[in-house]
Image (spheres, rainbow, N blue to C red):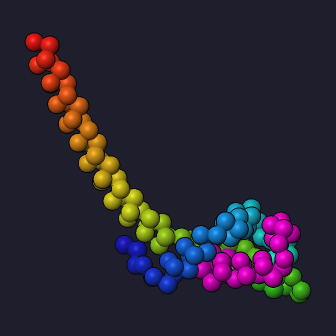
């Protein structure tokens, strides 16, 4: 069972809530990139991209390494296991609700079918 760290979940979901940061993760999934290259790719200032990368780094989703004058970003060690388990828990709740709803619908169909047979007689 995965132990939830509220701080980690908050940081991850806050990081993932932003479309630009999700785009940065998509870009880094294809390969490492400098903050400058990411800023150019997303048409934003270096300062703006540094803020986005900082949020991703705090969440453990991205790591950075400075080599000379270039700061390179790569996908971090965070594997989103806690986040996936948290989401799966609620998915199981919804699956159970839909299963119960399917049972009610099936019962209503059987009753309607039985009423139809009685009217024809």
Q: Is residue 113 visible?
A: yes
Outermost residue on the top side: it is: 121
Counting from the top left corner in percent of width and height, residue 68 is at 89, 87
Q: Residue at x 89, y 86 (%)?
A: 69
Q: Residue at x 81, y 77 (%)?
A: 35
Counting from the top left corner in percent of width and height, residue 92 is at 35, 58
The residues colored magenta run: 38-62
Q: Quadrant of residue 36?
A: bottom right
Where the N terminus falls, by quadrant? bottom left
Task: Indicate whether residue 54 is drawn in magenta.
Answer: yes
Where the C terminus falls, by quadrant? top left
Q: Is residue 77 visible?
A: no
Left or right: 70, with 113 as reference point: right
**Number of numbered tags placed on the structure image:** 0
- Dominant SS in magenta: helix
Outermost residue on the right side: it is: 69
Counting from the top left corner in percent of width and height, residue 14 is at 57, 76
Whether 45 is drawn above or below 93: the answer is below
Q: Residue at x 39, y 58 (%)?
A: 91
Q: Quadrant of residue 5?
A: bottom left
Left or right: 35, with 61 as reference point: right
Counting from the top left corner in percent of width and height, residue 47 is at 81, 82
Task: Indicate whether residue 29 is drawn in magenta.
Answer: no
Q: Residue at x 42, y 78 (%)?
A: 4
State the residue in front, 4 or 66: 4
Left or right: 45, with 8 as reference point: right
Left or right: 46, with 90 as reference point: right
């Amino acid at each position: 069972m995965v132990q939830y760290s509220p701080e980690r979940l908050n940081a991850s979901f806050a990081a993932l809530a932003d479309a630009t940061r999700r785009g940065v993760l998509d870009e880094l999934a294809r390969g490492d990139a400098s903050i400058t290259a990411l800023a150019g790719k997303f048409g934003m200032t270096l300062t703006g991209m540094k803020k986005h990368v900082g949020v991703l780094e705090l969440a453990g989703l991205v790591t950075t390494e400075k080599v000379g004058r270039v700061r390179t970003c790569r996908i971090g060690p965070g594997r989103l296991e806690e986040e996936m388990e948290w989401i799966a828990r609620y998915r199981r709740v919804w699956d159970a609700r839909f299963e119960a709803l399917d049972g009610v619908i099936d019962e209503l169909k059987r009753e309607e079918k039985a009423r139809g047979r009685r009217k024809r007689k």
